[in-house]
Amino acid sequence: SNEAGIPHSRVNDTIASLERRGFVEVNIGERKVFVALPPNIAFSRLINEVELLRDKVEDYQKGYVKEEKPFILHLRRTTDFPTFIDEILKRTSHEITIVLPDGAEHLLDVLSKNSAIDYITVVVVSKRPVSFSYTINYVVEDPGDNVLILSDAKNVLMMPYISYKYGGRTKVLGFYTNYKEVSWYVYSYIRKLAETAKDVRIHRTYTPKFACLFNAISFYKNASKRRVRAIIRRTTNGEIRTIIGDIISVQENFVNNITIKTEEGEEYVIGGLFSVVEDWEVLTVEFL
């Protein structure tokens, strides 16, 4: 009590707490004797308990889909751009789609400096063909005025290129967000932009993964690959299922969807982001 500055009335509670944590042992005889364990033994026990707890948490997380809270972060300086690129790449598991205004092709150099880009499916929308390690390059007449990056159809980075080019004379240069409404708008905008492509170039023929269904359809049509593994979510109850099969048909009108036939003969009609017409919404499509 004197050494620790703990009131006499709290000593027993404090020692009991230390005993539960494995730092103190109690020898009971005619009187209680409290023995402090050597630190290396006490902390070894604690570390083992933490490791066991970590294993339990990991087991729990395997069956848990984390819904990240909505956020929006603002770019205020041109020097923020590489930092935000690094951040969005950290959050990208499968696919990144980039819209580059005319003259902004040099911004691909910022992406190329991050080693994570080598393990991600890269789709570029540009006015002229680009020299980059992409999977798909949509060459369009007018890619617009904003640099847009859509990551796994969930995260969006937007920056007006003119503000970037002339030093960012506005208070806000752009934004980075995971709001679903913004993701849906950008997804729809890029999809419409891709439909106007005067040239679609396939650069890589490895096994890419797509989160944007319209990109998967473009790859299917231009690379002549149809065998896929798809992770899909039922629109009615959120059930998640993994299927393997062949794309047997594609529908492209006011909706985009694909039909996959599995080895068991089951057929799934699968739509894109926020599907409302189809029974299944695609999370990822991986070509095999």
Image (cartoon, grey):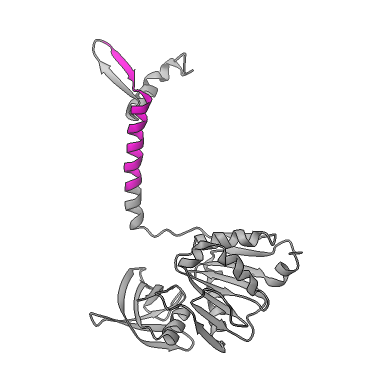
Q: 287 or 144: which is nearer to us?
A: 287
| In the displayed structure image, the side of residue 62 where residue 216 appears, left or right | right
Q: Where is residue 10 in the image (x, y as percent from the top left)?
A: 42, 20
Image-based side of 30 in relation to 184, left or right: left
Q: Which quadrant, please, contains the C terminus?
A: bottom left
The range drawn in magenta is 31-55
Note whether 225 is above or below 122 in the view shown. below
Secondary structure, magenta segment, majority class: helix
Q: In which quarter of the image is residue 248?
A: bottom left
- Relative placement, left or right, of 276 versus 148 is left
Q: Is residue 32 above or below residue 88?
A: above
**Which one is nearer the viewer's eye here, 99 or 27?**
99
Q: Residue at x 54, y 70 (%)?
A: 150
Which residue is at a point 60% across and 72% down the rendered structure image? Answer: 148
Displayed quadrant of residue 81: bottom right
Q: Which residue is drawn at 35% across and 26% down?
A: 23
Residue 242, x across and y down, in percent: 32, 71
Is residue 52 magenta-colored? yes
Q: For residue 27: magenta?
A: no
Q: Position of residue 233 (x, y in %)?
A: 37, 71
